[in-house]
Image: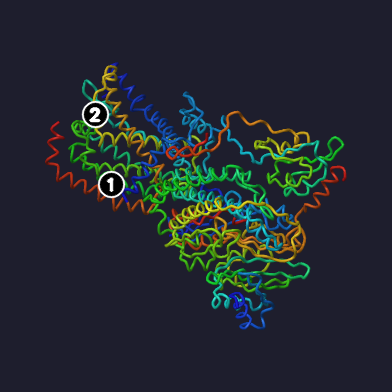
């Protein structure tokens, strides 16, 4: 019983000198994996206006609008659940998922990406990125 | 004879009149359709003599074309490893059913939810009050087929196409 | 002596999106009445308006932040049973890998919530940190951290990435070693014993009568696990045991979860070793033939039941979900009769209820 | 008759009241301890802790000041049903009472005789005990005046806990008094110059450490403030400056308690003379040792929050009445039995 009371004390003290796990977010960012599904990006030139992405979207995040004499989907980032269904169904391979996750806006209207914004490539990731790694048994897990 | 068929056989011999249909659906699955007025007795029989003791779910289905509501009690037998669906149909206009709260205590919230979502009155249930919906809810039971969402996706889609300048 | 009505939640540090109406006499809680529905989204109704494929992202949000991979399996099982679709072997293995990884993540989350309920914040952070390892693995496999939409009708969407197997095995080894620290800090901590042993004892007979499922039922000593009782996917090919508790108290409910993590690691090792080569997806028609099916899967919180009535169209006629937390909820008022106020958070968290799962 | 102070005496008094044991010291102690607690607990949990505010790069040293500035800008909300006078005065009383006991603790000897303390009285131990007894009444008053259910439960818990743990504290102080033969804290330190009381009375030390943690409502004994059960206990309704005062008063209490235990068990200022500090002022050397001992005690008390789950109220009272009080009585008996061998060593000095 006494051992059980005292042991956490030393264990806690030992952990106080381990490497911290937190990512100092604005300065350092987590590196998304290769397969990461972030904002959907449209390639306007390849789009054949078939509307299958609009039909398959479970949350009505896509909607057809007129753009340069063509019907092009418009993207509502506030409704998108990043489920990848539209990318899978697209027969012309015009849609793709990017690694971009930070697309919050101040207004709800700002979340609606019109076709020209929808087709912009994602912003580059910050220079300093880290991934989670197992260092060794003593130092445990950390971002590096 | 498999265990599932034995279950069917014993129910049929005990209640020959009240079973509408009883069949083995697949391995571990048994479906028993009964008349609504004898569901309590059949439930007791299932629990006490066939060992169906672990309540899994109570669900309702609204068959609006036949003007009927179906209530399905799904019970698992821990020893026999069989899932029995005890089902009964009740008229849609006057949906009342004897509550099985005294048979399986676990149906307390399941029946309350079914009452709330389908408007089926379970006689003898201690507390039929609002569970998931807001307290001030006064619309029809929402999972019935005649409860329409304010705007179905199809209508919305057509409206969107119209706004986009036609297809 | 007067009885005081105390409203606990939904704005309260421990209850989440629940509200409990307590009858308190001094420091003794005479009765607890749960008030649920704060996160009700009407997923059963939403599912009737969407096609079977569109339902995938909606349904996994029933249990979103913990166990979406394990939850969705049951829905797919039901559809594939109705269609008579045989999923490729490799896809089955990948589904199991995703579900078991998710179970580990979910149980680690349960452990950290448990230590919050007893007031030990250190064990909130340690399992959360190590859960990150599992979530990172899942991100490598599925492309998302929490809501994966990984399994689909007829298989899975992505194959295993390169180097996944080695990385996964390395992390599982680490997790297994790391569990020792959890035992030292939390489970063998004498103060924790004082708080959780003999608190909220659920007798096996009561547990069966009330329809409690999952680790809570197993902690009471009843050996029920869908993975063994009616093996789905490829669970019949793995060699694993079902941990059970002795007393059915809060402590046992946590210990069973820790032991289940060990068993999940065991399953994952076998799955990663035995995984065959082959296709990962089979084409499935959008229309499901007429019929009905009831399938059950063992999600992290217990047995998850899906009842689907198909009417031969692209959309389900009726989708009934029987989530584990909703079925465990009935144990809460049963256990919280005449207990001290300080035990309410412990009993509540030990049942591992999550509001979204209860409300759907 | 008002004694006439010389200029140097006047300066010394000002220094004492405003800077060292007086006003600035508990505030600075609170600031450093709050920062240290957050940082240290964060490191145990493998987090970073406060990061951005402060002079040194990424240490967050000024985080407590930033928090305090934020809190004093906030609106003070008084509940409609509250008993306003008591509600408003309780946080002020709490901080005053908490910082009062520092005045009676000797921190260092002066080279010309006398001690570095604000007010010298031969019965200082009794005075401090009396001040501690006043704390539960402020908590009960505040909890009752808030007129809220969680506050009431928290206040009742606080009353139960604090009153129950007065007893083991008083009992273990009894064995100190038996050993040293005086109520004067300065004399108690003097008697420890050859051997500290922690070596002579280890059981008494453990009892008083645990009891004081309970008295301070530190985890694992923070039952009156248990946020998972009663939101924040008796101060739930306080906002803004009042909340800041309540929080700061807890750390004033911590300051007083660690000082008291240092004086009683760890030999106060006694320790080898450090030449560098001694050259500046002979007081500083004693103060250095005093601070070191306080720091060790503070770390031990803070660690409790990172490693133990909270107890339940009945288990806490059980521990108090059935474990700590018998232990304290055993310590008294041991002290009485062994006094004949130890007394010449202690009193002879």
Q: CA distance from mark 2 to mark 1?
A: 27 Å
Q: Please name the residue shown 30% across and 52% down the image.
A: D321
Compared to residue D154, the image places residue C22 above or below, namely below
What is the number of the mark on residue C336? none
Q: Nearer the viewer, residue C349 or A119?
A: A119
Element at label 1: helix
Q: Is residue D167 left or right of residue C334?
A: left
Q: Which chain contains the residue that carries disc 1? A: D
Please tell me whether mark 2 or mark 1 is closer to you in this view. Answer: 2
Residue D288 visible in rendering: yes
Element at label 2: loop
Give the quadrant of residue A74. Answer: top right
Crowdedness near tag 2: few (<14), some (14–19) or many (≥20) residues, C-alpha within 10 Å: many
Percent of width and height locating residue D70: 52, 32
Q: Nearer the viewer, residue D76 or C144?
A: C144
Q: Please name the residue shown 86% across and 46% down the image.
A: B162
Quickly name the residue at label 2: D270
Quickly name the residue at label 1: D168
Q: Nearer the viewer, residue C266 or D23?
A: C266
Percent of width and height locating residue C170: 50, 44
Crowdedness near tag 1: few (<14), some (14–19) or many (≥20) residues, C-alpha within 10 Å: many
Percent of width and height locating residue C194: 38, 54
Q: Which chain contains the residue that carries disc 2? A: D
């Amino acid at each position: 019983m006494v051992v059980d009371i005292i042991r956490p004390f030393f264990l806690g003290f030992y952990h106080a000198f381990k490497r911290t796990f937190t990512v100092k977010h604005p300065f350092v960012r987590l590196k998304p994996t290769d397969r990461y599904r972030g904002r959907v990006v449209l390639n306007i030139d390849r789009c054949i206006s078939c509307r299958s992405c609009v039909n398959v979207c479970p949350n009505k995040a896509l909607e057809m609008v007129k753009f340069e004499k063509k019907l092009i989907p418009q993207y509502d980032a506030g409704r998108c659940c990043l489920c990848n269904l539209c990318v899978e169904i697209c027969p012309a391979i015009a849609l793709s998922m990017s690694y971009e996750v930070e697309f919050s806006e101040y207004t709800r209207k700002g979340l609606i990406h019109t076709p020209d914004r929808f087709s912009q490539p994602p912003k580059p990731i910050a220079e300093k990125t880290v991934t989670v790694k197992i260092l060794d048994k003593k130092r445990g897990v950390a971002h590096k | 004879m498999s265990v599932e068929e034995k279950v069917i056989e014993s129910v049929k011999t005990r209640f020959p009149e009240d079973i509408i249909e009883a069949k083995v659906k697949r391995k571990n699955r048994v479906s028993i359709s009964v008349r609504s007025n004898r569901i309590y007795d059949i439930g007791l029989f299932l629990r006490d003599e066939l060992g169906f003791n672990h309540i899994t779910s109570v669900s309702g289905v609204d068959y609006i074309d036949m003007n009927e509501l179906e209530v399905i009690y799904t019970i698992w037998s821990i020893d026999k490893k069989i899932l029995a669906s005890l089902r009964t149909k009740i008229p849609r206009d006057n949906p009342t059913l004897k509550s099985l709260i005294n048979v399986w205590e676990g149906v307390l919230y399941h029946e309350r939810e079914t009452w709330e979502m389908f408007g089926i009155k379970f006689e003898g249930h201690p507390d039929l009050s609002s569970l998931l919906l807001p307290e001030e809810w006064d619309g029809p039971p929402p999972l019935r087929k005649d409860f329409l969402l304010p705007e179905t996706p199809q209508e919305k889609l057509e409206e969107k196409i119209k706004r986009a300048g036609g297809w | 002596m007067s009885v005081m009505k105390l409203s606990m939640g939904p704005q309260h540090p421990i209850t989440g999106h629940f509200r409990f109406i307590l009858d308190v006499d001094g420091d003794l809680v005479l009765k607890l009445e749960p008030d649920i529905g704060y996160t009700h989204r009407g997923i059963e109704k939403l599912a009737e308006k969407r096609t079977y494929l569109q339902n995938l992202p909606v349904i996994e949000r029933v249990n979103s932040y913990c166990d979406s991979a394990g939850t969705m399996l049951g829905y797919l099982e039901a559809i594939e049973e109705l269609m008579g679709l045989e999923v490729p072997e490799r896809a089955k293995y990948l589904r199991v890998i995703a579900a078991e990884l998710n179970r580990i993540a979910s149980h680690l989350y349960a452990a950290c919530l448990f230590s919050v309920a007893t007031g030990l914040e250190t064990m909130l952070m340690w399992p959360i940190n190590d859960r990150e390892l599992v979530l990172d693995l899942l991100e490598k496999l599925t492309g998302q951290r929490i809501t994966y939409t990984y399994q689909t009708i007829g298989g899975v969407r992505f194959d295993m990435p390169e180097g996944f197997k080695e990385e996964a095995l390395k992390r599982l080894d680490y997790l297994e070693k790391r569990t020792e620290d959890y035992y030292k800090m939390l489970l063998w901590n004498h103060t924790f014993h004082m708080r959780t042993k003999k608190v909220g004892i659920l007798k096996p007979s009561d547990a069966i009568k009330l329809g409690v499922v999952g680790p809570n039922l197993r902690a009471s000593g009843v050996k029920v696990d869908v993975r063994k009782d009616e093996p789905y996917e490829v669970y019949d090919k793995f060699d694993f045991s079902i941990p059970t508790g002795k007393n059915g108290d809060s402590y046992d409910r946590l210990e069973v979860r820790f032991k289940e993590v060990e068993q999940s690691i065991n399953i994952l090792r076998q799955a990663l070793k035995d995984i065959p080569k082959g296709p990962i997806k089979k084409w499935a028609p959008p229309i499901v033939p007429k019929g009905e099916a009831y399938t059950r899967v063992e999600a992290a919180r217990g047995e998850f039941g899906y009842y689907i009535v198909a009417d031969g169209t692209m959309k389900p006629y009726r989708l009934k979900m029987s989530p584990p937390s909703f079925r465990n909820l009935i144990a809460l008022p049963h256990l919280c009769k005449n207990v001290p106020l300080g035990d309410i958070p412990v009993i509540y968290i030990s049942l591992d209820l999550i509001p979204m799962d209860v409300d759907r | 008759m008002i004694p006439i102070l010389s200029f140097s005496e006047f300066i010394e008094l000002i220094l004492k009241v405003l800077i060292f044991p007086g006003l600035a010291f508990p505030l600075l102690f609170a600031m450093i301890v709050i920062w240290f607690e957050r940082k240290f607990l964060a490191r145990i949990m493998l987090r970073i802790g406060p990061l951005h505010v402060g002079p040194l790069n990424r240490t967050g040293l000024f985080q407590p000041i930033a928090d305090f500035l934020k809190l004093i800008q906030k609106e003070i909300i008084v509940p409609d049903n509250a008993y306003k006078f008591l509600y408003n005065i309780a946080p002020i009383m709490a901080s005053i009472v908490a910082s009062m006991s520092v005045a009676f603790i000797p921190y260092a000897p002066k080279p010309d005789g006398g001690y570095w303390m604000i007010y010298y009285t031969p019965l200082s131990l009794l005075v401090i005990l009396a001040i501690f007894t006043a704390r539960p009444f402020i908590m009960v008053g505040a909890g009752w005046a808030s007129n809220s259910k969680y506050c009431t439960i928290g206040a009742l818990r606080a009353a139960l806990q604090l009153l129950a743990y007065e007893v083991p504290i008083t009992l273990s102080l009894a064995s100190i008094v038996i050993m040293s033969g005086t109520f004067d804290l300065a004399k108690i330190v003097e008697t420890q110059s050859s051997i500290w009381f922690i070596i002579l009375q280890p059981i008494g030390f453990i009892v008083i450490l645990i009891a004081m943690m309970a008295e301070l409502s530190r985890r694992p004994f923070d039952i009156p403030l248990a946020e998972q059960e009663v939101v924040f206990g008796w101060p739930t309704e306080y906002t803004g400056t009042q909340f800041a005062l309540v929080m700061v008063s807890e750390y004033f209490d911590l300051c007083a308690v660690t000082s008291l235990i240092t004086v009683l068990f760890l030999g106060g200022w006694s320790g080898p003379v450090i030449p560098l500090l001694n050259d500046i002022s002979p007081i500083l050397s004693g103060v250095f040792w005093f601070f070191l001992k306080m720091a060790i005690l503070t770390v031990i008390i803070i660690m409790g929050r990172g490693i133990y789950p909270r107890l339940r109220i009945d288990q806490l009272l059980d521990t108090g009445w059935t474990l700590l009080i018998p232990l304290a009585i055993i310590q008294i008996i041991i002290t009485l039995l062994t006094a004949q061998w130890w007394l010449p060593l202690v009193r002879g000095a």
